Image (cartoon, grey):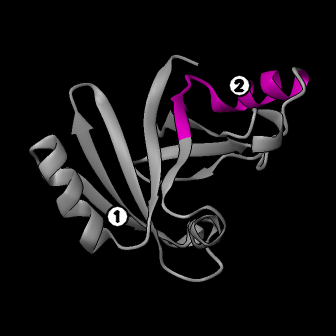
Amino acid sequence: MRKIEHIGIAVKDLAVSNPIFEKLFGAPPYKSEEVVSEGVKTSFFMNGPNKIELLEATNSDSPIAKFIEKKGEGIHHIAFDVEDIEAEIKRLQSEGFIVLNEIPKQGADNKLVAFLHPKSTNGVLIELCQEKK
């Protein structure tokens, strides 16, 4: 893992949350998109070299909807930039981590992504991100 790629925050409504984070960072989101396969709409903000991703569920079966129902709005995951996501998945599995999707899938912001189960990471959902080439 090379660096923290972004911190994901689950929100009920981007229309409410985007203005809050615009005031906080002094700038609008640099990118918004929907990831249909994950049932989310996202907004990305930059703060210096750091990225924040806001995630709103687009349906009640979305992992974000389930997270908010159980825990409320707040930090959902920490994403790490990796050079070779497939190699990193294998390495982390060999170290005993539970990988939720062994085959990387399309994520937001032109990334391939995979997730580590929070049960194996002290309760924190970890996302691995590799820039699509």
Q: At which x and y percent is residue 83?
A: 55, 22
Q: At which x and y percent is residue 122?
A: 75, 33
Q: In this rendering, is residue 1 above or below 61?
A: above
Tell me where the magenta segment starts and ends, as one range: 78-94
Is residue 79 shown in magenta? yes
In this view, the residue in front, 73 or 90, is 73
Residue 117 in view in this figure: no
Say which quarter of the image contains residue 52: top left
Residue drawn 66% across the image and 67% down it? 70
Spot the residue most to the top: 2
Q: At which x and y percent is residue 33?
A: 34, 64
Alpha-carbon neighbours of circle 1 within 10 Å: few (<14), some, or many (≥20)?
few
Q: Which residue is denoted by mark 2 in the rendering?
A: 88
Say which quarter of the image contains residue 65: bottom right
Whether residue 97 sits left or right of residue 86 in the image: it is right
Q: Disc 2 marks which amino acid?
A: Glu
Q: Which residue is denoted by mark 1 in the rendering?
A: 33
Residue 12 in view in this figure: yes
Q: Disc 1 marks which amino acid?
A: Glu
Regarding mark 2 in the picture, which secondary structure is present there?
helix
Q: In this rendering, is residue 106 above or below 56?
A: above
Regarding mark 1 in the picture, which secondary structure is present there?
strand
Residue drawn 67% across the image and 39% down it? 124
Is residue 92 shown in magenta? yes
Alpha-carbon neighbours of circle 2 within 10 Å: few (<14), some, or many (≥20)?
some
Which numbered tag is attached to residue 57?
none
In this view, the residue in front, 46 or 92, is 46
Whether residue 25 sits left or right of residue 64 in the image: it is left
Q: In this rendering, is residue 5 above or below 26?
A: above
